[in-house]
Image (cartoon, rainbow, N blue to C red):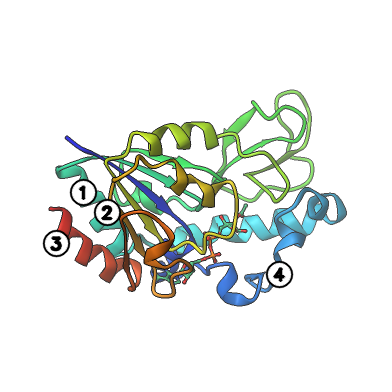
Amino acid sequence: MKNIVVLTGAGMSAESGIATFRDADGLWEGHDVMEVASPEGFYNNPELVLEFYNQRRAQLKSVKPNQGHFRLQKLEENYNVHIVTQNVDDLHERSGSTSVLHLHGELRKVRSIKNEQLVYSWEEDLVLGDLCEEKSQLRPHIVWFGEAVPMIDQAVELVEKADVLVIIGTSMQVYPAAGLVNYVQHGAPVYFIDPNPSVKESDFNNLTIIKEGASKGMEQLLTVLL
Ligand code: OAD
């Protein structure tokens, strides 16, 4: 079977009711992104940051995967599909996709502030005083601005082996994620699904833009790929 690699961003989950980032002028659910998604923000006001992610984690219980997620999962009937997502939600997993690499971390995990190897599944609220086994404070398992992206090498390896690359719902503003498209082998078709695409077809070799939301865009793509 051929390999399809799918890069997804916040737009993938928009139809599930999860807000994107840049559609709201750099505010994330009403907060300055740097206030809630940077080490400095956490240092300045840890309670606010923990509460912010507690709300995002709680929100996961009330949202569901959309047709875009399910249609993506359907590709697994005919292809080896690997998803590389910038999203911290679990909607790809919940729609049945079997290979999901989270570049920017996961809401349902936390880790030690001192030893980043100590990562735990976490379903409830996280508060100051919740400690890892080495007695350090726990923080959300999220890659904040200015932090390294440990999964990027694995993501590059996947993209290099892709026969087809699909990109859905990302503004291509945040690196290194936005640079992954440059690792696709020459000649491999690239499909970009976004109602407001930040790239044009002449920007990359063999690029087709599907100017639709994730559900409709995936419906169109399935007619091409299946
Ligand atoms: P952005 O908010 O920057 O971009 C969202 C993209 O989704 C835009 O291009 C929209 O046009 C598109 N979009 C909106 N509705 C859509 C729909 N129904 N279907 C498909 N696409 C739709 O989000 P990202 O590119 O994911 O990082 O942002 C990248 C990173 O910046 C995030 O992972 C996050 C953020 O700060 C961290 O939290 C570390």
Q: Nearer the viewer, mark 2 or mark 4?
A: 2
Q: CA distance from mark 1 to mark 2?
A: 6 Å
Earlier sequence position, callout 4 versus callout 3: 4
| Res. 52 image quadrant | bottom right
Q: Mark 2 is on which residue type?
A: Leu
Name the image quarter holding the N terminus. Answer: top left
Badges 1 and 2: C-beta atoms under 8 Å apart? yes
Is the CB of mark 3 within 8 Å of ligand 1? no
Residue 151 picture location, percent across and down: 54, 35
| Res. 83 image quadrant | top left
Residue 75 circle label: 1
Q: Nearer the viewer, mark 1 or mark 4?
A: 1
Is the CB of mark 2 within 8 Å of ligand 1? no
Q: Which residue is mark 3?
A: 223
Q: Which residue is mark 4?
A: 31
Q: Nearer the viewer, mark 4 or mark 3?
A: 3
Q: Residues within 10 Å of mark 4 (few under 14, many from 20)?
A: few
Q: Which residue is mark 2?
A: 72
Q: Nearer the viewer, residue 187 or 139?
A: 187
Residue at image position (75%, 60%) is: 34
* Above or below, 210 relative to 205: below
Earlier sequence position, callout 1 versus callout 4: 4
Residue 79 picture location, percent across and down: 20, 41
Q: CA distance from mark 1 to mark 4?
A: 36 Å
Earlier sequence position, callout 1 versus callout 3: 1
Q: CA distance from mark 2 to mark 3?
A: 12 Å
Q: Mark 1 is on which residue type?
A: Leu
Is the CB of mark 1 within 8 Å of ligand 1? no
